[in-house]
Image: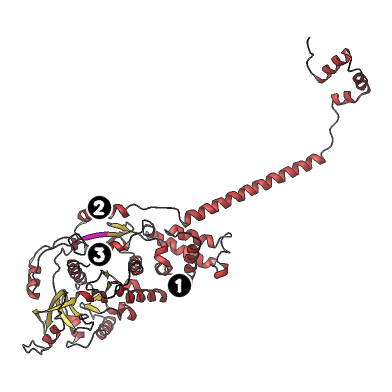
Amino acid sequence: MSESTDPASPADAIAAGYAFTGPALELGALLWDGVCLPDRQIRIPLPMLNRHGLVAGATGTGKTKTLQLIAEQLSAGGVPVFLADIKGDVSGISAPGTPNEKIAQRAAEVGQQWEAAGFPSEFYSLGGIGAGIPVRATVTSFGPVLMSKVLQLNQTQEQSLGLIFHYADAKGLELIDLKDLRAVVAFLVSDQGKAELKGIGGLSTVTAGVILRALTAFEQQGASEFFGEPEFDTGEFLRTAADGRGMVSVLELPAVQDKPQLFSTFLMWLLADLYTDLPEVGDLERPKLVFFFDEAHLLFNGASKAFLESITQTVRLIRSKGIGVFFVTQTPKDVPADVLAQLGNRVQHALRAFTPDDAKALKATVKTFPNSAYDLEELLTGLGTGEAVITVLSEKGAPTPVAATRLRAPQSLMGSVGAEALDAAVKSSLLYSRYAEPVDRESAYEKISAEQAAAEAAAEAAAAQAEAEKQAKEAAKAARSAPKPDPSLAQQVVGSGLFRSLARSIGTQLGREISRSIFGTAKRRR
């Protein structure tokens, strides 16, 4: 193919599909026939960012820089952004970029007026592991479906966990941290508690054992840090800076990157919590928040049917709450079809076809795009770093033509700001004092422990009383059956005839003297 000056040429037809009249994010310049055309800009309408999206591509093709580019422009447009920083190289969005020859060349190629700029940012961590303001959730708010996913429970075990949560809610047993959940599970299979769920199915000791073992393994991964109070208010992610720019919330995950299922499930909790709390607003001129879900394939690996249904429903309905969600992964096939169907904006970086599986994934990816003037199989394997195939939703909600694009360079620092700068930013945040210190108030564990202690004390007191009564009865029985002792000398004397004779003369002086001496009393002196 070669570029044509004919207004009806494919390049012009593609570019016309991106000539929006309203506010839009500038992604880059059209690529056609191997040539970059800086006068034909590829864009995304700002109101369409809540129609969700997908950023995909092989490792090293520039997905992270694409996130940074989109996040910068959203922030500049007053839209808050949430980013998951898996590898620790997104924190640079808070600092101005460093000019260099590569950036200058890229800017010239795509028609970009590049200026170094940093953007207002807050840094978070899961439960305080690593640098960042701690983000914690209570077990109750996390819920049985997400908990089952992260504990890798099967469907039957997931249903049992749902019963456990139901029981705890009904009995006012607050599930704040993992020891609360452990205490309730152990109680429900104890002699005292096993009858509690009998009317609604009960809890088998085998299932309880599986759940308790899974909790132990979960805790060994450091999960105890993530559950507790103060619970993070996800509304903090919706803030704007004093100058009106959207706040960029960066969740720092390098410290837990070896626990992918944990952080992916936790990100799903953040999204689900936003969905639960926010009111319906319909279509807005700009989103309330755009949420980037990195390493998205980890979220769906081994997911139960209930979990997938929950994700699909959340993605489908959260648009009307003003939230846009972008999944970031290697190939579109990593995302279930029902979820993929909800993603209206697509940025597809290069794919590799080194193996039969790669070739199959490439063909599957091509089928997810609208009809195109490009040979997409050839194009997707030939894209360079920082280039992508793009299709988005127009201002009218219709898909735009597929456009090969050379992307703009981010204006902020492409890399980490460094540990010292990150720590300083965290501790200077107004949110740090609100969430930094954990709080352990009375909840299910303390209540069950107190009841068990009281029951044990009452049982011990009853046992002691029973033993005392038994010993008293035995002592009384022994006293009744014991032989009568021989009369003492005093008893013999009192019973003798001489004594009785003397007693009759007790009124005499001599009688009184004798009587006193016999009973040992002192002789009265006159």
Q: Hey, what amino acid is under mark 3?
A: Lys
The answer to whether residue 36 of the structure is visible from this angle is yes
Q: Nearer the viewer, residue 8 or 333?
A: 8
Answer with left or right where residue 61 lies relative to residue 521: left
The answer to whether residue 52 of the structure is visible from this angle is no
Q: Is residue 317 magenta?
A: no
Crowd band around label 3 with a 10 angstrom C-alpha radius: few (<14), some (14–19), many (20+) = some
Which residue in the protein does label 1 denote? 154
Point out residue 127 in the picture as x, y percentages from the top left corner: 34, 58
The answer to which quarter of the image holds residue 43 is bottom left
Point out residue 192 in the picture as x, y percentages from the top left corner: 58, 59
Which residue in the protein does label 3 denote? 87
Residue in view at x 42 percent, y 69 percent: 148
The answer to which quarter of the image holds residue 73 is bottom left
Q: Residue furthest top?
A: 526
Point out residue 206 in the picture as x, y percentages from the top left corner: 52, 67
Crowd band around label 1 with a 10 angstrom C-alpha radius: few (<14), some (14–19), many (20+) = few
Point out residue 144 in the picture as x, y percentages from the top left corner: 43, 68
Compare marks 3 and 1 and give the one earlier in the sequence: 3
Answer with left or right where residue 206 lies relative to residue 308: right
Q: Hey, what amino acid is under mark 1?
A: Asn
Disc 1 is placed on an element classified as loop
Range of magenta residues = 114-123
Q: Is residue 411 above or below residue 18?
A: above
> Main SS of the magenta segment?
loop
Distance between mark 3 and mark 1 Cα atoms = 31 Å
Which residue in the protein does label 2 denote? 427
Compare marks 2 and 1 and give the one earlier in the sequence: 1
